[in-house]
Image: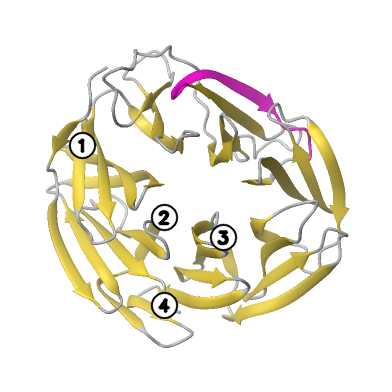
Amino acid sequence: MNNLKEINPFKTTVKKSDFGILTTLEVDFDLSAKSGICLGEKTLLATDIYEMGDEYTTLVYTLIDKNGQMQSFVEEEGILPNFFKSPDEHIFVYVQPYDPDKDLDICIPVFNRENYEYPKRKRPFVGTFAGILGNYSILHDNWSNTWDDNKPDKMRAVEFKDGKVKKDHNSKIPLPKDNKIYVGSDEIHLLAYTPKGAIHRQIDIKANVIQERKLTLKVPFFREILHLSFTEDSQLISTKKGKIFLERVSKNGESEVSELIDIKDDIYATFKPEKIAENTFAIRFVKEFGNGWFVIREGKLLEFFYGNKGKKGYKNLLTDELIPMDDEDLIITELHKTAENNYTVIFYLRTEQGAKNKKLIILNRKVKG
């Protein structure tokens, strides 16, 4: 296969200040951020760039470092990218080659393709990257069957050998469905909410259940997993009536809750924690009238940024520090680690129906404290 070709599709501006580095990417007609992942001390971002209407689309991969510097490449093998990491920390991507009759995926490395043969096309798997287990990259799908309570979550274990994909192992995870997944310490753990309580399970590479337990959580509707284990303390992020909690669960199932912050308004959604340093996580969230992110380290909230609809900038509710923005009503599309204790937040503009979005805004920030 041929390597990616470098291009320069964006007009860029870079602003440096005490709060971090803001980089703006602009195009002439329209763009759409599609996917992102951490690569070393950089963020890899996939963007569709439209020209002369939606008929002409270019898929572009952009590497952004912690100083806001970037390098872009054009993907010519397909569309609808889905990134994941291999066991040796290289980035692979599922893309759909152009075919008006069939929706099939190929799995290829993003970079260094010169010694890679064109792979066989396969049925698409819409799961997201969950982590590494030995020689396997784990992807988890807990939303494509949301409409049917009797259809389970799915998992794909991508087996690697000598740096190349050897085989995809597809499995259905036994009910209950709608699991959160945690991959760590060479184990795969699941946590699902049921009317009878939370169910914690450990599974193997084929989704066979190794062990399970019922947990009685003090805040039943957990949001995200920081750590999940049968032999160590587990840590969960939960929300209730505008409050955000950290719930610790001992290996014996005993629960202890600490309130992190009360922002008064309900949080509609949170997203998978991004580990940016040892025991340090950044988590983005969505509310009815805005969005933001927060950073937690060893049970302590370090920063909590919130952007309200109709207002410009993101305010740290702990310090009143304001990250100024030229635009209002921004949507956060990605949050990823760059260097240790550094992270990138990627925004795009909320537009009226039919209007074109020509801009992406990228914040590179180092955690204080």
**Residue under the image location 42 percent in, 65 percent down:** 341
Q: Distance between the residues labelled 4 and 2?
A: 17 Å
Q: How crowded is mark 1: few (under 14 residues within 10 Å), some or many (20 or more)?
A: many
Q: Is residue 6 left or right of residue 156?
A: left
Secondary structure under tag 4 reads: loop
Q: Earlier in the sequence, mark 2 or mark 1?
A: 1
Q: Where is residue 259 in the image (x, y as percent from the top left)?
A: 67, 79
| Part of the protein shown in magenta | 162-176
User: What amino acid does circle 3 point to?
Assistant: Ala
Q: Distance between the residues labelled 2 and 3?
A: 18 Å
Q: Earlier in the sequence, mark 1 or mark 4?
A: 1
User: What amino acid does circle 2 point to?
Assistant: His
Q: Residues within 10 Å of mark 4 (few under 14, many from 20)?
A: few
Residue 269, which numbered label? 3
Looking at this view, is 9 or 330 the one in front?
9
Residue 368, which numbered label? 4
Secondary structure under tag 1 reads: strand
Q: Which of marks 3 and 1 is nearer the N terminus?
A: 1
Q: How far apart are marks 2 and 1 (CA)?
A: 20 Å
Q: How far apart are marks 3 and 1 (CA)?
A: 32 Å
Instruction: Choose mark 2 or mark 3, whichever is in front.
Output: 2
Q: Is residue 295 magenta?
A: no
**Residue under the image location 66 percent in, 40 percent down:** 186
Where is the N terminus found, in terms of image quarters? top left
